[in-house]
Amino acid sequence: MADTIPVEVVISLLRAASAEQEVDVDGLIEEADLPERDTTRVGYELRRLRATSDRWRRRGQELAALFSSARELAQLRNVDELLGRLVERAHDLVGTDVTYLSEFDANSRELRVRTTLGTVAPSFPGLRVPPGMGLASQVVEGRRPCWTSKYATMTQAPHDSGIDAAVAAEGLVSLLGVPLLAGDEVIGVLFAANRVEHAFSPDEISLLSAFADHAAIVLQTARLLARTQESADETRRAYGELARHVEAMERASEVHSDLTSLVLQGGEAPDVATALGRALRCRVELLDTDRLDHALADAVDRSRRSGRCASAGEGTYAVAVLAGHTLLGALLLKEGELEFGPVELRTAERAAQITALLKLKQHAMIEAEQRVRGDLLADLLADDPDRRADIAARARARGIRLDELRSAVVVSVPADRRREAVRALRRSGGPVGEHADQVVALTSDPDPGAASALIHTTVSRAVRVAVLAVGASFADATGDLRAQVEAASACARILPSLGLSDKAVTADEYLPYTALFGPGEARVMTYVRCVLGPVLDWDAEHAGTLLPTLAAYLDNRMSPVATARVLHLHKNTVHQRLERAAELLGEDWQEPDRLFRIAVAVRLVQLTTSR
């Protein structure tokens, strides 16, 4: 038969049709030596078969790449990393100039460019697409692929000036967008774009759509896993917070139990700080009001106004100890092993309330004890001897041994500060109380000077005003005590007229003045005026030279030469001044009696002018 084709030729032609490399089809047909009509038909069919084979081969490669990408994406769990890899794989599959993914917000209906590959314009990443605008909104609303070969002339979707500017800046011409669908929910749009005019083929649209379907499932799964992880993390955090709260409540219950025991067992305020520090595993200090520096005082003041703990900086908290509006002190807490939370702070506030109750109880007991000790002192100083009956036994009942007391100190302070002074001296050990508008304290110190110095320091620190303390020793609390206290009281009343109002002295040091004048500044000034009046008047009118000369003359054994040397004057000048003094005081001013009274008056003037 003339039109019969040899088997070998048929096999060669079939191999040529399915070969991956380019084959010389015309040469194979010529070798078959077919009629011209058959040659044309065989050539056409052979080329059609080869094109179909090439298309399927390419389709198979694309599908293999698609499934490989899907498997790779399925292994990712981080959403941001997944989006970046998704765009990268889509870029490799389709081979366009630019690939990007826009995320869809179901609440605002906006799309935002989340991830890009191949872009150069800085305005493109993060670009927002308003609802209903542009090709992306058309993809979302239609839930199907949409494309355009020339964006500038696109008419199937409304343009937006912001989007048009970004597309122009990036130089994009043709765009293909496919939806990322998770069930009926659109979660985004995947775009492939070229910077040249290009008509997207059905194969390209189908390939990108298939990849988008796989990617949407993976992306949605990753999001769900992320949400699940967030929920699990939140659950763990909530459980941890609950565990911490339960632990804190247990600590608070422990503190409450300890504080209740303290109250019932007669504990004191410092024991509260110890129990609180042990329960909260931190350092706790109980501060008196006089131990607050500026920073702590500010924190305590804020706590006082709010009734809550106040931060004092660097993990330190202060809580005021209050009784009504009266500040009794403060608890100072410094974080240790535990970080303070609301429960710990509330626990500290409750502890401050218990501290206030114990301080009030302590103060009430101290006040009661002080009243008893004050009554003992009043009985010791009373005129009625019956009040001192069995007083030694009563003193012993209060822990006071009268036979050990050796010094009495009379303290002169303003009337409104006497209670503070008594309160400050309550730890002195002996009876303390108010007597004859002064504060009297009895101590066991045999040295009245040391006793008055100590009490002066203690009271001055408490009342912060001028304090005059006069000490006197006694042998018997039931014998000469009254006389010694009266002597010290008289001294305390006369010393201010001598310019002494803030000092610690003994009554013996100023006994001559007390003996001469007794209590009262008026008597001192009257005496000075009576003895030295003419000299004082002369000095007031003549630059005040006579009184200093008299003082130096008396201090230097009435030697004019020694007086002149001390005053840096000529001897004759001293003689002239002494003559003037004689004219004013009388020629007998150097008689022993007159001279003694003049010397006392001069000394009194010196003391009053040296204040």
Image: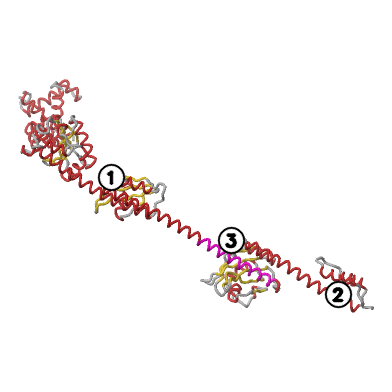
Q: Which residue is mark 2?
A: 43
Mark 2 / mark 3, whichever is N-terminal? 2
The answer to whether marks 2 and 3 mark residues whose Cβ atoms lie closer than 8 Å is: no
**For the residue carrying disc 1, how many other residues have a C-alpha within 10 Å: few (<14), some (14-19), or many (20+)?**
few
- Locate the C terminus and report the quarter of the image it occupies: top left
Where in the figure is residue 345, as x and y percent of width and height?
36, 53
- Locate the N terminus and report the quarter of the image it occupies: bottom right
Q: Which residues are magenta?
A: 204-231
Q: Is residue 487 left or right of residue 151?
A: left
Q: Which residue is mark 3?
A: 77
Q: Which residue is mark 1?
A: 288
Give the amino acid at mark 1. Answer: Asp
Identify the residue shown where x is 20% and y is 47%.
Answer: 364
Q: Nearer the viewer, mark 1 or mark 3?
A: 3
| Numbered disc 2: secondary structure | helix
Mark 1 / mark 3, whichever is N-terminal? 3
Q: Is residue 445 left or right of residue 313?
A: left
Give the amino acid at mark 3. Answer: Arg
Mark 2 vs mark 3, CA separation in Å: 53 Å
| Numbered disc 1: secondary structure | loop
